[in-house]
Image: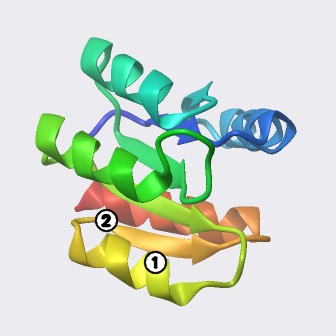
Amino acid sequence: MRPKKILLVDDEAEFSSTLAERLTLRGFESDTAPDGESALVKIEEEEWGVAVVDLMMPGMGGLAALKRIKAMRPDLPVILLTGHGSTKEGMEGMSLGAFDYLIKPLAINELIEKIYEALAG
C-alpha cells in the first residue's frame, strides 16, 4: 500500500495549510508546496502516496505540473483541484494521467474519499 503521505500543491497558502491540518487530524501525513516547481523538488526527494494539485497557479500551472510529475513518477496518483468550475481542464488532466479531479470549494470528506481510492489503486 502507498504511504499515507499527501503533497498539497496550491498557491493559496491558507487553503493548503487548513487542508493539511485537517488531513493530519484524519491520520495522514501531509506537506504543502506553493507552486509546481517546489512540488517537483519534493516529489523527487521523497516518496508520496498522493499529490493533490491545484490547476490554477502562477508560474507552472497544474496541468504542466501534472505532465512533469507523471514523467518523474508515473505511478504517483495526482488529484487535480480546480476552483473555477471548469470541467474542461479537469477532463484534460484526466487525459494526461490524473487520477481524478475535484471542483473547489470541496467537502473534506469528498477529498479524503478520493485520496483513499487513489491510495488503494
Residue to which mark 1 is pinned: 90
Q: Position of residue 41 (x, y in %)?
A: 36, 18
Is label 2 in contact with label 1 (beta carbons under 8 Å)? yes
Q: Secondary structure at mark 1?
A: helix
The amino acid pointed to by label 2 is Ala
Residue reaching furthest front? Answer: 59
- Give the residue at mark 2: 98
Q: Is residue 1 visible?
A: no
Q: In the picture shown, does residue 119 fall above or below 8? A: below
Quarter-wise, where is residue 71 in the image? top left
**What amino acid is found at the position of numbered circle 1 in the picture?**
Gly
Residue appearing at x 46%, y 77% in the figure: 89
Circle 2: element type? loop
Res. 30 image quadrant: top right
Q: How is the image coloured?
A: rainbow
Measured as percent of width and height from the top left, residue 27 is found at 61, 36
Q: CA distance from mark 2 to mark 1?
A: 9 Å
User: Where's the C terminus, which quadrant?
Assistant: bottom left
Q: Residue at x 35, y 71 (%)?
A: 93
Examine the rendered structure and indicate whether residue 52 appears above or below residue 14: below
Disc sitting over residue 13 in the figure:
none
Q: Is residue 73 left or right of residue 78?
A: left
How far across and down, in percent of the image, does residue 29 sit?
55, 27
Q: Is residue 48 above or below residue 94?
A: above
Q: Residue at x 48, y 22 (%)?
A: 38
Residue 41 in sight here: yes
Image quadrant for the N terminus? top left
- Label 1: how many Cα within 10 Å (few below 14, some 14–19, many 20+): many
Name the residue: 34% across, 78% down: 92
Quarter holding residue 109: bottom right
